[in-house]
Amino acid sequence: MSGDTTPQRLTPAQRLGRSAALTALIVGGFFPFIWMVLTSLKSEGELQKFPVQYLPSKLDFSNYARVFSEQPFAQFFLNSLTVSLLSTVLCIAAAVPAAYALARLNLRGRGLLMTTVVTFSMLPVVSLLVPMFRLMRGANLLNTYPALILPYAALSLPIGILTLVAFFSAIPRDLEAAAMVDGTTRVGALTRVVLPLSTPGVVTAALLVFVNSWNEFLLALSFNTKLSMRTVSVGVTLYQGEFAFPWPLIAAAVVVATVPLVLLIAIFQRRFVAGLTAGGVKA
Amino acid sequence: MTPPLNSSPSRRVRREPGEGLLAFFLLLPAAALLLGVLLFPMLTTFRDSLYLNKLTEPWLTGFVGLKQYAQMLGDARFGAALRNTLFFGVLTVGGSFLVGVPMALAAHLPSRARDVARVALLLPWAMPPVITGLIFAWLFNAQYGVFNDLLVRAGFIQEPLRWLSTPGLSVLAMVLTIVWKTSSFVALIVLGGLQGIPKEMIEAAQVDGATPTQTFFRVILPLLAPSLAVAFIFRTISAVQVFDIPYTFIQQAPAQGLLETLGVYIYRTGIEFLDFGYAAALSVALFALSLAVTAVYVRFVRDGGNS
Amino acid sequence: MRTRLTLTATLALAALGSAAHAATTLTVFMGSQQRPEIFQPIFDRFEKQNPNVRIKIETGGATSEAQNQYLTTVLAAKDNTLDLFLIDVVRTATFAAAGWAEPLDAYLPSKDTYLKAFLPGPVAAASVGGKLYAMPAFTDAQFLYYRKDLLEKYKAKVPRTWDELAATAARIQKAEGGSLQGFNFQGAPIEGTVCNFLEMTWTGGGSVNDVTSPAAKQGLGFLVNAVKTKLAPAASAEMKTDDSRQQFQAGNVLFGLNWSYAWAHFQGNSPQPTRVKGDVGVAALPAFGKNASATCTGGWEWGLNAYSRNKATAVKLLQFMSSNDVQREMAVKGAYLPVRKSLYNDKAVLAANPHFKSLYPIVTKARPRPVTPAYPRVSEIIRNNVSAAVAGSKSVDAALNDMKRDLEPLLK
């Protein structure tokens, strides 16, 4: 641990605590996922056993091949990526200015405005399903990307805005004021001072929106019914039979649906946050 | 107590000229998106709650005012679902903070395992929700579930527990599943908040001789308050609406009376029993519940960094 | 440049061509679990016979819930994109009441004669108030699967009554030792459990209209007792259809209740290894005392979307799908149980599925679950109470009383 820039020297007890917390986090976060990975490598005959057989008798990767041969899973993946990325971009693009206004401008009834924003995520999606279907059909958008991008961006907008408000208001006003004294406009202050300083906030908000979109099921099932337009969240459920639940195959699909997503996010997060700690704060 | 509205010094700053117009333009894209996509479906739901619309008894139509709200008062199943929702809400929101905040702290600590820790923190939340309930139902299975296997191997139990078909245990199983899934969400927001805290402030506290515990409670926690409030608001809203995991569990376990949440009851009423009028009224009740809890906490976000 | 021109020309021609034929496109909805690959060649044949009809398959989610959710969304919005939908037989009355399924009577002038060749169970399940709201597509029923080898070894007969079943199961279970389950049924809160309960009640002379009758008590009591006396596994209240199938297939079960799909798995056409190939027998469910055997009608049927703009053409496809030829092909290629009686004696069908012959007397006695628009509620009430009783968290009497209280306003 010598290379670490631990902010404070830790006592052995604190070190132990840290190791315990990290171990708990890693084991807790990973175990159902590891169970899925192991399952995806087994044959179905190895599942219903007690005592449980943890390791597959032989590594069998054929389930991964079947994930792609039985359904156009690569297409599902591409669809999910497109839909999630674009809805994230749209949502954050709308959330940043709104959050800035709510955090920084002297608006009357700010609390009321913010509460109003949040109310847009207070009705269960299932009750919005039929009217939203009508809306999308009326706009001739069924079986297109916007049919999902628009509702995903809108449904995640409240959480996006509130997350950003929390981050924006944590930035000392003096920094902004200093910039504005130097002749920068409000918008300039937002893009040159506030945004760079709240990178972790923007990254967090983007992440929340992205994963929300990635995992949405109800709307995806009903709005985009063409196989070529299906997303991963619906895709992983397409391998079941009327009665049978082929776990190894479904586990493989879950792994395929989750791993690239998580890696992508981890890399993305690391880059941005690393960029921030490298030089952002003292700007 | 929270200071009364419009009293904090920051909000008494004089308005700059044109700030109203600027605010209008800054808020416009968000307003357009929210209103354009969600206003019609939301208004439809409010309107539907005032009309009878039960497709299995198609002769029941027409405006009935608040009758369907009155119906809820006499609906024992609504009462149970409300009780269950509150019960699971308190346990799982509380649980997700108890687990999620330490998770975020652990993942924020500099260590060689940090990247792995961050992936571990993301995984539960990235797991497709439709499958999460099924995975856990399988882990809790009485005949060949992993949890029973581990407990038997460790010598804690002799015979496998019937987690899903023993009412009390099925409640516990569901709480654990939801906490597992949602702690990750809390941790993500809190981790973001931690990363947003300028290092200088922590260093300053250390220079003043604060212990790590003091630093946490006196410096970090206050600065995290807005993030915690955001996490709390949205955890609460999602707990009030919780659907995926209870819906899966109810199909595995006979304790429907204990496991059915409002979200599940609304789904059943609308999508399965085709009573769209009553489902809309139930949705509005759920909306009111979320609103009541949330309005209080929006203040924390609003006042967060300013006070 | 040239390729683009050619492309435009081709497209224009294609457009002209389709306009000239005034092609009708029928959109047919079925779950991905319904094996669209078996239906596709059949639809292709229909297209060939009807050159101006195109058929498009649309698959919803794979689970019954996901499909239901999709259909509900689309039909509640009065959508006309789908012309036909394949639905579970229990949905007939709901779809009829909601005005989503068009009655077929007007399209079938000699309906009664036409339906005479069909099994009565699926027709009854597709009918509401004398009107036919769906066309039976393929049927199903629950059967008693038993281990021929074990019965032979212990010189036991296939049980005709539930008491015989219990006695035989107890005797063989004791002699075999180990983890052999004497009796396996579905007790989780699922549709199979509803059927198991109805069957236990029917075979005691009872009916769902009186669930506190001695027959219903005897029926549910039998299931609960089977768990108490360890004939059935302790976790029976968590047993789902496919768990039952896998248990039997692994050689752990003497007598098991299940749908027809289990047969092919037992014979080795399955992702799991089978230990019972050649050792499985199928029989009608036993009954209590001198009562008659009975079973639940399962299977799927074609609904005609009431908002469809292509009803006449769609009905033509329905008749094609229930014709002798197509029903035979589905039985041969997909082991679907035909809805036409004569096919249970058909050479080609029996060559592919020799056991169909012994299934015939059983499927002719299959009875529909309550045909009511409130079926989703009815099912929920039955399955939760039965499962709770099997789990031991409710007494038999309490479960049946609760059931009666909740069912009565629905089954007036």
Image (spheres, coloured by chain):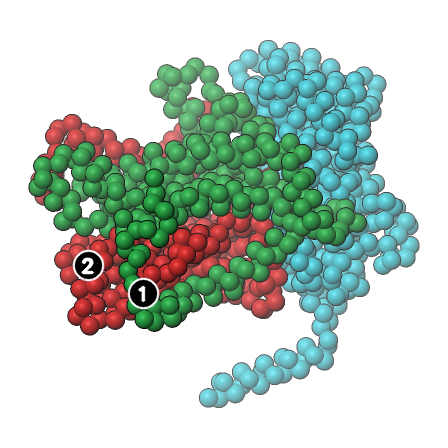
Chain colours: A red, B green, C cyan
C272 to the left or right of A41: right
Q: Position of residue A63 (x, y in %)?
A: 44, 46
Residue at point 72%, 30% (across, down): C406
Residue with the mark numbered 2: A174
Secondary structure category for the residue under label 2: helix
Residue with the mark numbered 1: B15
Residue at point 55%, 64% (across, down): A143
- Would you call the spot at circle 1 few (<14 residues within 10 Å), some (14-19), or many (20 or more)? few
Q: Report the front residue among A28 and C258.
A: A28
Q: In this rendering, is residue A170 above or below B84?
A: below
Q: Are marks 1 and 2 on the same chain?
A: no
- Would you call the spot at circle 2 few (<14 residues within 10 Å), some (14-19), or many (20 or more)? few
Q: Report the label total.
A: 2
Residue at point 18%, 38% (across, down): B215
Q: Position of residue C33 (x, y in %)?
A: 60, 47
Q: In this rendering, is residue C3 above or below B195?
A: below
Q: In this rendering, is residue A33 above or below A134?
A: above
Q: Amino acid at mark 2?
A: Asp
Secondary structure category for the residue under label 1: loop
Q: Which mark is residue A204?
A: none
Q: Nearer the viewer, mark 1 or mark 2?
A: 1
Residue at point 53%, 46% (across, down): B287
Marks 1 and 2, how far apart at CA: 17 Å
Chain at tag 1: B
